[in-house]
Amino acid sequence: MKYLLVLNKFELDVNKLKDKIKSKIQASFYENNGLILETNDNINEILYFEEIEKIFVMYKDCSKFDFNTFKQSFSNLKVKNYLVKIKFLSKIPISAKSLIKKINSVLKSHNEKDPEDIIYVEFIKKDNIPYYRIFTARISYYEKFKMKKNKLNIEVVLENPEEKEEIKDFLRLCYIFNLSLNILTKKNIDSLINKAKKEAKGIPYENFILNINKKLNGIKIGFSINSKLDENDFKEFFNKNKNEKINLIFGNEKFGLTQDLRNNLDYSFRLTKETKKPLRASHALSYIMGLIN
């Protein structure tokens, strides 16, 4: 099978990455607007190489584009509740919306809110002729290995964020530490969340678990400069309860937690030896994950 390797955007030596992959599986490579891997081996061993952001399965290699053949390309594709992503590697006078409409007319199971599969289509011009190729990925397949990678049963909770920067910082941290994020709010903050997502680039949101007003189940933990229990108490608590579901709960930068939520905490801990100026919420989450790890 052929796979498209989407690489993380940091300095790396592609030849060293190829050698690293070959140490795990038998594979050959070629570069065609991206690194293509060809192998008959199981790719589980390389799913979480830090150099690799995502792996797409090639469904259809480069083909000349016209609307009829494009539609036919999807007739035998087996997907459930899919999300479509279109990428133009060259300027082509075709709208992504029209292409997605054609795909939906064939597959008829479009569901961006709770997708099970990703359909990724790339377009490029060669000798002024448009070509396309199709890749797929099963979201649950990647999430299965994601859970194996991180066994912490932790959910991060952010109450009443008022700035996109707050949300952006939490999105990045939760992605880095492979944690789900639950935002509690009585306001409609969809616009704020979308702005934060645009600025927090590089996060594959189709795999990211973001909940809004999800009911809090498990142990509820908050953090305050006025708490009687300190970070040593937190470490002792976590070591005893790390197999339990734990909610790490943070308030917004201006007002902290509401009185109602603060009253419903099971535990509250003080972080660092600072007694006057509290940590920012995102800094507190970073500090906590340092304690845990």
Image: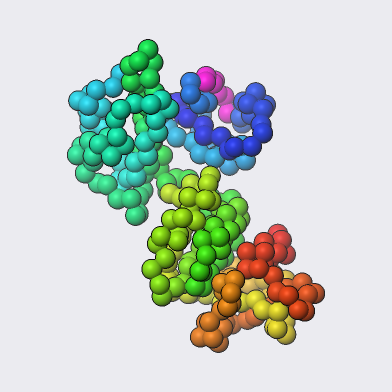
Relative to 45, residue 215 above or below: below
Q: Nearer the viewer, residue 176 or 185?
A: 185
| Quadrant location, the C terminus | bottom right
Numbered circles on residues, count: 0
Q: Name the colour scheme.
A: rainbow
| Range of magenta residues | 25-31
* Image position, residue 156 (x, y; %): 55, 66
Residue at horizontal 26 percent and vertical 32 percent from the top: 74
Q: Can you say whether 247 is above or below 88 in the image?
A: below
- On the image, the x and y values in percent for residue 238 come to 67, 71
**Residue 188, position in %: x, y?**
38, 68
Instruction: Please say whether residue 288 is one of the residues in the magenta stretch.
Output: no
Q: Quadrant of residue 267?
A: bottom right
Q: Is residue 100 visible?
A: no
Q: Magenta stretch containing residue 27, yes or no?
A: yes
Residue at point 44%, 45% (across, down): 141
Left or right of 211? Residue 68 is left
Q: Is residue 65 above or below residue 79?
A: above
Residue pictured at 30% horizontal, 27% vertical: 93
**Name of the residue lying farthest toward the top:** 127
Quarter the N terminus occupies:
top left
Residue drawn where x is 25% and y is 46% of the image:
109
Query: Which one is in front, 267 or 8?
Result: 8
Foreground residue, 143 or 101? 101
Confirm whether residue 189 shows in the render: yes
Quarter occupied by residue 52: top right
Q: Give the answer, above or below, for where 78 lies relative to 168.
A: above
Q: Is residue 284 left or right of residue 34?
A: right
Expressed as whole percent of the image width and height from the top left, the position of residue 198 reads 48, 50
Q: Is residue 79 left or right of residue 254?
A: left
Residue 46, by quadrant, is top right
